[in-house]
Image (spheres, rainbow, N blue to C red):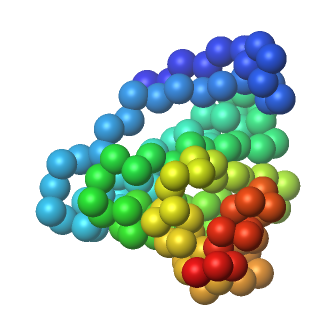
Amino acid sequence: MFIHTKSDRLPCKSILFTNWTPPVTNDDSELQRSVQIFILKSIQYATTRLEAASVAFAVPDFCDKEETVVKAMLKEAKHQIEKSTTLDLSFLLLANQQTLLELFLTKIEKMQGFLQLSCPTTCKNSCQKN
């Protein structure tokens, strides 16, 4: 399920690839469960097999259930952070993923104390205009 490779010139030790595909379903709970398992298994692999202290996830914008995906990612991130205070998790978004960014902002605001948002100045300026 996982393949990891050296990062070469990127500012990280290794890159972890997985063949996870979200289920095609109208059932939000099934999608949420699938996302949470993906996050959990990825973190477990990275921290146990690769001895990683930090994990970053590229956030996909592949489906029309983005709110469900964001909610599940953050819920599992919070759960993993509660289990390990030394774990550093990041979610990476592309500049054109404005809807996802707004969803993350909204959800993270509600989870104050556990998660914080950090983004480039251009991102912050863009969010403040809305």
What is the x, y in percent for residue 73? 51, 60
What is the x, y in percent for residue 34? 35, 52
Q: Determine the image quadrant of residue 21.
A: top left
Give me the residue at 80% from left, 17% from top: 9
Give me the residue at 59% from left, 51% from top: 95
Of residues 124 and 67, which is closer to you in this image? 124
Q: Determine whether, in the image, residue 23 is placed left or right of residue 105.
A: left
Q: Where is 14 relative to 96, above or below? A: above
**Image quarter of the C terminus:** bottom right
Of residues 109 and 95, which is closer to you in this image? 95
Q: Determine whether, in the image, residue 38 is placed left or right of residue 78.
A: left
Q: Where is 24 relative to 50, above or below? A: below
Q: Determine whether, in the image, residue 106 is placed left or right of residue 127.
A: left
Q: Determine whether, in the image, residue 15 is placed left or right of residue 28.
A: right
* Residue at the left extreme of this rendering: 26
Q: Determine the image quadrant of residue 16.
A: top right
Q: Determine the image quadrant of residue 45.
A: top right
Q: Is residue 81 visible?
A: no
Of residues 129 and 82, which is closer to you in this image? 129
What is the x, y in percent for residue 98? 51, 62
Q: Where is 60 relative to 80, above or below? A: above
**Image quarter of the N terminus:** top left
What is the x, y in percent for residue 14? 72, 23
Q: Is residue 106 visible?
A: yes
Give me the residue at 77% from left, 36% from top: 52
